[in-house]
Amino acid sequence: MASTIFSLLIIFIFYQKGKQDDINREKSWAGTSKNIPKYEASQTPLFSEKHSSDIVKKYFGKDFKYKMLNIPGLRGAWSVDDKGKVRLGVNWVPQGVTSSQDKVYVSTYDKKKVLKSVIFEIDKVSGKYIKSYILDSKAHVGGISYDIYRNRLWVATDDGSSKISIFDQKTLDNYNFSVRKHPIKASSIVKLKWWTNTSAISVSEDFISIAKYQSDAIGGVIDIGLDDKGNVDTKSLPKFPIKIIGTTDEEINNTLKKVVFLMMQHFHLALRGCKELAILIISVFLHNRMDKKVVKYF
């Protein structure tokens, strides 16, 4: 009996050491110009698939079996600085995620605020990195939503006041960072001078929902109508933010539920059969960005 316990103890010690060695190896991998092709992004995940699975199961239970995608660029990705010089950044912070019928888009910003923000395009089926879109902004780009009705990508590129850049599919398809070596040009831009700190956006067939982040005050969510062509209906623009999140827990939770519903509605339509991935992405987003209690609504 004693020998059995001793053997199990030895196995456990070696298992823990091996697990820690894996974590140490993951943390030590650094992106450089030698191991990340110019104009592209790293495809090495921050953690191994098993380690990532262990982290997710810690919060969602051992029966969690949803598909996970690796976010490119977290070990390093190329962009440009204010002078237009192509440089490698290793401080990219993921902010938003959305998807078209066959692609997933992840927006990131440079934590050091030196390089222009980047959107990574991922193949939804294979999970492989396709290419990077360099934005002409260093904004947090937390708001990103793909319009499945008109095949356009909406991205919040705030610069003091709210600004949403819209890219049609043709513009996205034709963009090649390695050839142009400069940021992608928006097809059109929507400016909302009375709105700031856009944290999330969700585009539906006839309106767009915009959420505001505020660390030291009350945030809010507004809906703005879209015309028949999918453009912002100027007649529906309010003169001041409406539908502000309340001060009581009940009011805040009700507003968050609405945000979750709108995001779920958009993701469910966009992913077309990949609802599990949508739930994972949104749950993790809300778990990290808003309130752990929110994930219980799923």
Image (cartoon, rainbow, N blue to C red):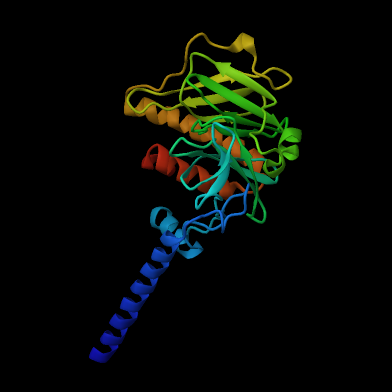
* Residue 77 in the image: above or below residue 148: below
Q: Position of residue 221 (x, y in %)?
A: 48, 23
229 or 79: nearer the viewer: 79
Residue 31 vs 187, above or below: the answer is: below
The answer to whether residue 76 is above or below residue 21 is: above
Report the side of 93 relative to 182 (left or right). left
**Residue at (39, 31) in percent of width and height:** 253
Q: In the rendered image, is residue 1 in sight?
A: no
Q: Where on the picture, by quarter, is residue 185?
A: top right
Residue 238: x, y in percent?
Answer: 53, 11
Query: Of all residues shown, which one is farthest toward the left?
Result: 2
The residue nearer to you, when weighing 132 against 278, is 132
Q: Is residue 149 left or right of residue 10?
A: right
Q: Return the x and y of residue 118 as percentages of the image width and height.
A: 57, 39
At 37% across and 38% down in the image, what residue appears? 291
Q: Residue at x 71, y 37 (%)?
A: 172
Residue 218 seen in this snapshot = yes
Q: Quadrant of the N terminus?
A: bottom left
